[in-house]
Amino acid sequence: MLSELSEVGIAAGSAVVLLYQGWALWLAAEMPRLEPTTADGGPGSFPRVSVVIAARDEELDLPQTLETALAQEYPDFEVVVVEGGSTDGTKAVIDARAPRVRRVEEPPLPAGWVGKSWACWTGARATDGEWILFLDADVRLHPAALRTAVAWAEREGAALASCASEIEMVGFWERTVLPFYIQMVLTYFRAPHVNRATSRAAMANGQFCLVRRSVYESLGGHEAIRSHLLEDVALARRFKSTGRTIRVAFAPHLVRTRMYRDRGEMFEGIRKTVYGTEFSATRQVGFLAGLVGMFWLPLAVLPLGLASGDYLVTAFGALLAFALFAKHVVFARAVGAPAAYGLLYPLAVGFYIVAILSSLRRGIGGGTVSWKRRTYPIRP
């Protein structure tokens, strides 16, 4: 039998873990959904939209993205692709769709800029729409995506409106890791709270980010957040901090994407999102401790109770194991992965932990972070 003090500690820790799991499910239930809408209103109801796509070595994904962008059931929009020195056939993909798609050559990357922000800023300045939709090059749109998003933003009085997409998951590692990644984004940024004027929570999804040009330009656009690798979050925080209304919704029937094509690209992408170009060892260690404490350590309670013959600890351990695995099964199914992959969540946590340890090593060693054949220095 374990001591009474140990039992109290395990009971308190179990309560914290269970509350966190319940909170994550509550946030998921709170997340608003955006569904396709039918066209309504006269010509004046459709302000001009400029779709800006940053493309660098995207010949595999860009064709579908452009075709679904051009198929939008919206009367007044333009599609501009900022080509960033690709070494594959990206330029040919763009030019094959001229003049419906306009290619803009990205100027040399200035010092202090992150590549995507530079491409988005370049594209924004080359367009004239009242609204600007920043769209990733691997996103596929429902034909009603543009009209639905613009109507939603106008109705909500939003200066920035962003859609969380359905993530296509192919293969073992994507189905194992990405449901957990989505959960981390949901809870870390408290995504549904972004829509509350009284909350400081702010985030956007750079895959589909719609901004009102007048506000975007008044706040300095991407130039104001040029050094941030997580440009979508930085942009949303800038809008929110100045009192602008921002909106985020889950829109799986409007927006789809396959984020990563293999395990290596997924690891690099997750490591990039862990800290961007701003490094804090304290924050990283805290994040690491949180992952272990909330997702791995609770699974040791059941074996501990069984080994010690402590029935109370065994009961807590059984409850924790059931709650954790059931919650991740439900979450995996909710975001489009087979439910059984939720049972592999400890492996997903391990994948995340390795990414954090790698980022810690790079950050402490004064290294760089790489993405799309570009490297950026890590700063404290």
Image (cartoon, helix red, strand yellow):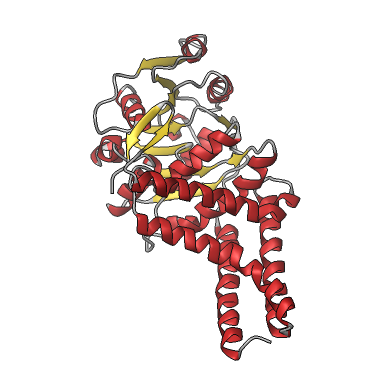
Picture quarter containing residue 11? bottom right
Residue at the image point whose x is 55% and y is 25% from the top: 65
* 238 or 13, nearer to the observer: 13
Q: Position of residue 8 (x, y in %)?
A: 58, 86
Is 261 situated left or right of 52 in this image?
Answer: right
Q: Is residue 26 at least partly visible in the picture?
A: no
Relative to residue 288, is residue 120 drawn left or right? left
Image quadrant for the N terminus?
bottom right
Q: In this rendering, does residue 84 appear at all?
A: yes
Nearest the viewer among 99 and 261 is 261
Horizontal and vertical percent position of residue 315:
72, 79
Q: Residue shown at 56%/65% (left/top)?
A: 294
Reply above or below: 174 against 90: below
Q: Is residue 305 left or right of residue 31?
A: right
The image quadrant that residue 367 belongs to is top left
Q: Residue 295 in the image: x percent, y percent?
A: 59, 62
Residue shown at 41% from the left, 15% from the top: 103
Compared with residue 169, is residue 195 higher up or lower down, i.e. above or below?
below
Q: Name the quadrant containing residue 141.
A: top right
Near-viewer residue (27 or 174): 174
| For residue 353, above or below residue 84 | below
Is residue 214 or residue 105 the one in the foreground? 105
| Residue at image coords 61%, 41% | 166
Q: Is residue 305 left or right of residue 358?
A: right
In the image, residue 189 sits, relative to residue 83, either above or below, namely: below
What is the number of callouts on the image? 0
- How far from the left and from the top, in percent, is residue 66? 53, 21
